[in-house]
Image (cartoon, helix red, strand yellow):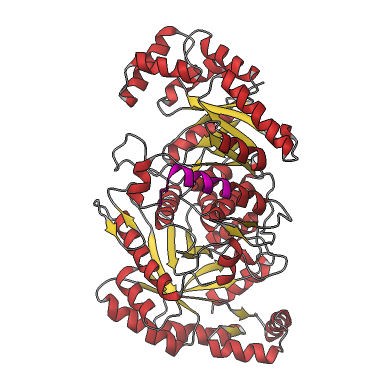
């Protein structure tokens, strides 16, 4: 059965309330995005450090899985990502997945003065970070020698209990390859079931070529939550999304259709989820950025397969 | 004299052991629980070394009153934006209980092992000064920006801290105390004899002028309730370092470390107080022996 995860952002009190809600509503995993600025926001809107938040959530929970979805490559050196990852892994008793991506929101890099090289360079760095962290996580991993990062041949401690490494991407050749080599989970964002299936098959083929058991890789996707059982509720959510993004509702629906984001009223979202599951997707992260706590139940129910 | 507990979990120490120590320190009414920020030590095999901010974030939620301190985070590990965001996040999660120590970084070994950049001392100091400017701009209530040669920040950063105190520390004789006097809420000295402490604190105070800056000291202690217990601990500590108890004792004495029975330790503590030290961080290395840790802190607090 497809696992449901949710992705939220906000201040600590909000996250704590979502954590409590998730633990009592069969949510498999709670994920936080990693942004120091919220898209479309004025720079003055607050943003926190998601790994710091996740460490606190780990201390406050006992069963739910936690994830970083995903951390942009140039915010932190892989040594810091690995050490924060392994510390959250320890605090949570093995419930943490560290997600890495190339980064995309130009404004936050500029605002904080982070380096923001070309997409090609960021993809190179991302691949190196995955390799570095995988080596650091693996007892006897043998270190890593890259162009951007190096890890000496020693065993950093503590060893992870069950730290997992996730790649986030759109399913292109580079992210397929780095997942096949180093990933425990591949989060393919915004794809139709046909495309998902194709990405999955290609990645599994590569993984086998690298001598890995392709079943080790967990398959997931993510998308903005926009569904309800009743048409009127769905229209209400759609207007909220429209107000948040400044796009008209027809355009939103068209884009969701094209990109394969499960959405809609009646059984539609659930059917789209079933099709993704059929294509091999094992976990779906619902992004709750435009959904208020009052609508959590309605929305999640509409996605359950 | 006030007291804090300083731990070194890069020498070994699980999150649970840190939690146990922090909870004890809270129950005892110590000012703060502090830990270092190192990713490894020279031990073989490398002992467990957790991330300071992730560990303090967990502790923030599992303690209620005690202040939590990183002493100190090296600017070589993280971009100042990440230090800033880690700090304001813990600030909110803890209800304003974070003490943020920032330093230049010094342990070359961990930088080499993890491939972290480790420029020469003058560049590290220049980066450190810029990181302080960056944090000040990011923490200031008004929108502020900073443009340096290593870091720059443009715009209005939120949230703002509610209770973060900035600590600058180290053993430098001039630049560090001056910088602490003008920039920090707390000047933390590494253990040294009272005369030396006084000179440095005076340097800090003259730079601070009317600013209120707390003068604190961090270092180990080796004490026992009786001469016999003290001698046993001294012998154990000496054998770990493969030296004689006599030479360890004289080394500690020269460094100004509180040693001996409660009476003898009391003299050192009051000399430090006389020199202007307002609070001592008792540094405890072995988190698996918390009984001795509790006994040591207890002796010093009650001298």
Q: Position of residue A34 (x, y in %)?
A: 46, 42
The answer, for residue A237, to whether it is visible in the render is no
Which image quadrant for residue B205? bottom left
Q: Give whichever of A89, B204 is nearer the camera.
A: A89
Q: Is residue A11 left or right of residue A127?
A: left
Q: Position of residue B240 (x, y in %)?
A: 72, 79
Which image quadrant for residue B223? bottom right
Q: Is residue A20 left or right of residue A291?
A: right
Q: Is residue B255 above or below residue A51?
A: below
Give the residue at x 56% y 27%.
Answer: A221
Give the residue at x 38% y 43%.
Answer: A47
Q: Is residue A203 above or below residue A102?
A: above
The quadrant in which the N terminus of chain B is found is bottom left
Q: Give whichever of B140, B82 is nearer the camera.
A: B82
Give the residue at x 62% y 80%.
Answer: B222
Q: Which residues are magenta?
A: A115-128
Q: Give whichever of A220, A57 is nearer the camera.
A: A220
Q: Position of residue A272 (x, y in %)?
A: 55, 14
Which image quadrant for residue B273? bottom left
Magenta-span inclusion, residue A126: yes
Q: Give whichever of A254, B240 is nearer the camera.
A: A254
Q: Is residue A19 above or below residue B7?
A: above
Provide the major secondary structure of the magenta segment.
Answer: helix
The answer, for residue A238, to whether it is visible in the render is yes
Give the residue at x 48% y 46%.
Answer: A122
Q: How many marks?
A: 0
Q: Position of residue A84 (x, y in %)?
A: 56, 51
Magenta-span inclusion, residue A122: yes
The quadrant in which the C terminus of chain B is found is bottom right
């Amino acid at each position: 059965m497809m696992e449901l995860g949710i992705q939220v952002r906000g201040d600590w009190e909000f996250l704590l309330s979502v954590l409590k809600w998730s633990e009592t509503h069969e949510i498999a995993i709670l994920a936080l995005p990693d942004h120091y600025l919220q898209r479309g926001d004025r720079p003055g809107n607050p943003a926190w450090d998601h790994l710091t938040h996740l460490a606190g959530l780990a201390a406050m929970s006992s069963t739910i899985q936690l994830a970083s979805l995903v951390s942009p490559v140039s915010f932190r050196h892989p040594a810091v990502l690995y050490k924060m990852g392994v510390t959250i892994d320890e605090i949570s008793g093995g419930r943490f997945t560290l997600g890495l991506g190339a980064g995309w929101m130009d404004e936050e890099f500029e605002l904080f003065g982070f380096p923001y090289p070309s997409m090609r360079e960021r993809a190179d760095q991302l691949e190196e970070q995955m390799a570095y962290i995988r080596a650091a996580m693996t007892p006897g991993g043998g270190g890593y020698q890259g162009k951007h990062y190096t890890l000496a041949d020693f065993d950093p401690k503590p060893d992870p209990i069950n730290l997992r490494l996730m790649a986030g991407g759109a399913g292109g050749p580079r992210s397929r390859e780095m997942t096949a080599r180093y990933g425990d989970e591949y989060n393919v964002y915004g794809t139709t079931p046909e495309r998902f299936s194709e990405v999955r098959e290609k990645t599994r083929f590569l993984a086998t070529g690298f001598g890995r058991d392709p079943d080790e890789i967990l398959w997931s996707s993510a998308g903005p939550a926009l569904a309800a059982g009743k048409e009127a509720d769905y229209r209400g959510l759609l207007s909220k999304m429209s107000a948040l993004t400044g796009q008209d509702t027809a355009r939103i629906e068209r884009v969701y259709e094209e990109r394969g984001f499960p959405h809609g009223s009646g059984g539609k979202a659930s059917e789209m989820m079933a099709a993704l599951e059929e294509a091999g997707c094992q976990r779906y992260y619902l992004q709750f950025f435009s959904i208020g706590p009052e609508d959590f139940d309605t929305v999640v129910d509409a996605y359950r397969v | 004299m006030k007291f804090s507990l300083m731990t070194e979990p890069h020498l070994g120490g699980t999150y649970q052991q840190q939690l146990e120590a922090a909870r004890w320190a809270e129950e005892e009414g110590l000012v703060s629980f502090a830990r270092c920020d190192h990713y490894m030590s020279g031990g073989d095999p490398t002992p467990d070394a957790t991330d300071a901010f992730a560990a303090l974030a967990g502790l923030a939620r599992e303690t209620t009153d005690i202040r939590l301190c990183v002493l100190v985070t090296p600017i070589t590990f993280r971009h100042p934006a990440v230090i800033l965001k880690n700090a304001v996040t813990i600030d909110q999660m803890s209800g304003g209980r974070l003490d943020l120590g920032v330093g230049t970084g010094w342990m070359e070994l961990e930088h080499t092992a993890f491939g972290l950049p480790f420029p020469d001392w003058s560049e590290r100091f220049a980066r450190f000064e810029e990181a302080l400017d960056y944090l000040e701009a990011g923490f200031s209530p008004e929108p502020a920006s900073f443009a340096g040669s290593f870091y720059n920040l443009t715009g209005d950063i939120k949230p703002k801290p509610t209770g973060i105190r900035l600590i600058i520390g180290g053993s430098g004789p001039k630049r560090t105390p001056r910088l602490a006097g003008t920039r920090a809420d707390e000047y933390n000295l590494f253990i040294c004899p009272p005369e030396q402490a006084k000179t440095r604190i005076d340097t800090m105070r003259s730079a601070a002028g009317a600013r209120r800056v707390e003068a604190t000291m961090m270092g180990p202690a080796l004490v026992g309730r009786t001469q016999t217990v003290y001698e046993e601990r001294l012998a154990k500590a000496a054998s770990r370092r493969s030296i004689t108890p006599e030479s360890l004792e004289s080394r500690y004495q020269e460094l100004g470390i509180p040693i001996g029975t409660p009476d003898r330790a009391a003299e050192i503590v009051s000399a430090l107080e006389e020199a202007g030290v307002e609070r001592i961080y008792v540094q405890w290395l072995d988190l698996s022996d918390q009984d001795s840790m509790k006994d040591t802190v207890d002796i010093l607090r009650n001298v």
